[in-house]
Amino acid sequence: MGRDHLAIRLGACRAARLAAFLVVSAFLVVPLGWLVGALPGLAWLMWLALPAASRLAWGLWQLPDVVEEGELPPLLPLMGLNVVVLLGSLTLLNAGLWLAT
């Protein structure tokens, strides 16, 4: 019953960089979906959350250089920012999809 999840397998540095990549790629899906005609133009409302997402991605990218093993304080602002980005971007995306119907 050991802990063997992806973050442990990858290590702190690669797991943080994977998370940063996923945050950025979530925002790249909207223009791609718009270009192929799968998403309406109002889906771009999601990009209003891009400043917070870029701060989160940049903080995650720098995290391995800052955090020592078991150190929690540098993670706390990023955890709060992650909630803001997730709720904000999904709310704006849903609002854009709703307004487009």
Image: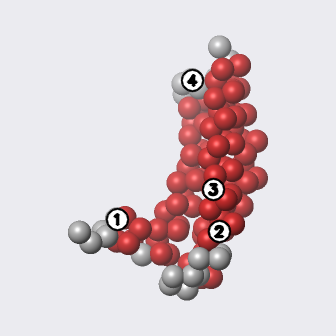
Instruction: Tell me the residue at 55%/49% (across/down).
Output: 25
Q: Earlier in the sequence, mark 2 or mark 4?
A: 4
Q: Earlier in the sequence, mark 4 or mark 1?
A: 1
- Secondary structure of the residue carrying tag 4 is loop
Circles 2 and 4: CB atoms closer than 8 Å: no
Q: Which residue is mark 4?
A: 37
Horizontal side, residue 41 vs residue 23: left or right: right
- Secondary structure of the residue carrying tag 3 is helix
**Which amino acid type corresponds to the residue marked 4 in the rendered image?**
Gly
The dot on residue 82 is 3
Q: Is residue 74 visible?
A: yes
Q: Earlier in the sequence, mark 3 or mark 2?
A: 2
Give the label, 1 or 2, closer to the camera. Answer: 2
Toward the viewer: 57 or 84? 84
Give the label, 4 or 1, closer to the camera. Answer: 1
Mark 4, Cα crowd under 10 Å, few <14 / some 14-19 / many 20+, is few
Q: Which residue is mark 1?
A: 5
Q: CA distance from mark 4 to mark 3?
A: 29 Å
Instruction: Tell me the residue at 37%/64% (across/down).
Output: 6
- Secondary structure of the residue carrying tag 1 is loop
Q: Which residue is mark 2?
A: 76
Q: CA distance from mark 3 to mark 1?
A: 20 Å
**Which amino acid type corresponds to the residue marked 2 in the rendered image?**
Leu
User: Can you say whether 18 is above or below 32 in the image?
Assistant: below
Q: Which picture quadrant has residue 97?
A: top right
* On-image quarter of the N terminus: bottom left
Q: Earlier in the sequence, mark 4 or mark 3?
A: 4
